[in-house]
Image: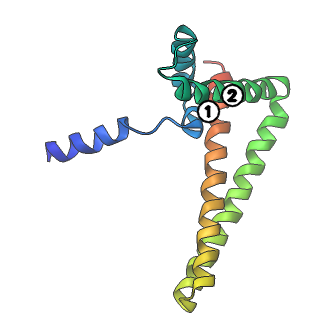
């Protein structure tokens, strides 16, 4: 049991730090920006630092938007969550169609619905990460 737990936890820590991951983990992003700035001009982690810096620019833009008009940003989050609910229903309907029809077109529709749902879910996580950075306390 302990070995299984250790494997699961180590798998969680080894997630690939891509653009989306950084956008959902702004505190790690800030830390890694500092590391990249300290290593500026070195080729060793140039590709990784490019991702970090792009995420930093995007995060800064979102934080600025949230601070300039918190109500508008909050509405953006609500709209995104409503869209997520609609996408969830599309996934459920597509799953039912696959069960009923069992054809390639239904499976393609399901895959498309799942991708749209996951993309929307990722965007919402980013919005909440921005809010967590800018909220007092």
From the viewer's side, name the closer residue of 104 and 12. 104
Mark 1: give few (<14), some (14-19) or many (20+) Cα within 10 Å: many
Q: Which mark is residue 9?
A: none
In the rendered image, residue 130, in percent from the top left (x then y), is placed at 66, 30
Q: Residue at x 15, y 42 (%)?
A: 2
State the residue position of label 2: 59
The image's mark for residue 129 is 1
Work out whether 39 lies above or below 135.
above
| Residue 53 placement: quadrant | top right
| Relative height, residue 92 to residue 67 (above, below) | below
Quadrant in which the C terminus appears: top right
Picture quadrant of residue 100: bottom right
**Rendered location of residue 16, percent (x, y):** 45, 39
Outermost residue toward the front in this view: 43
Q: Nearer the viewer, mark 1 or mark 2?
A: 2
- Secondary structure of the residue carrying numbered label 1: helix
Q: Is residue 2 above or below residue 136?
A: below
Q: Residues within 10 Å of mark 2 (few under 14, many from 20)?
A: many
Picture residue at 60% right of the left edge, 56% below the top? 118
Do the residues under discs 1 and 2 have CB atoms within 8 angstroms?
A: yes
Residue beneath the point at 59% across and 26% down: 52
Q: Pinpoint residue 66: horizontal percent, then vertical percent.
A: 78, 28
Residue name at image x 52 percent, y 11 percent: 39
| Residue 7 as seen in the image, left or right of residue 19 | left
**Tag 2's secondary structure?**
helix
Residue 64 in picture, x, y percent from top left: 78, 23
């Amino acid at each position: 049991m302990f070995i299984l737990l250790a494997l699961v936890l180590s798998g969680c820590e080894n997630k690939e730090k891509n653009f989306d991951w950084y956008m959902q983990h702004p505190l790690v992003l800030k830390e890694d920006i500092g590391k990249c700035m300290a290593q500026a001009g070195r080729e060793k982690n140039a590709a990784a630092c490019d991702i970090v810096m792009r995420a930093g620019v995007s995060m800064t833009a979102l934080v600025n938007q949230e601070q300039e008009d918190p109500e508008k940003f909050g509405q953006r989050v609500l709209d995104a969550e409503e869209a997520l609910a609609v996408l969830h229903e599309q996934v459920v309907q597509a799953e039912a169609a696959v069960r009923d029809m069992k054809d390639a077109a239904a499976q393609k529709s399901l895959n498309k619905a799942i991708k749209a749902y996951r993309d929307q879910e990722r965007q919402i996580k980013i919005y909440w990460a921005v809010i967590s950075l800018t909220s007092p306390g």
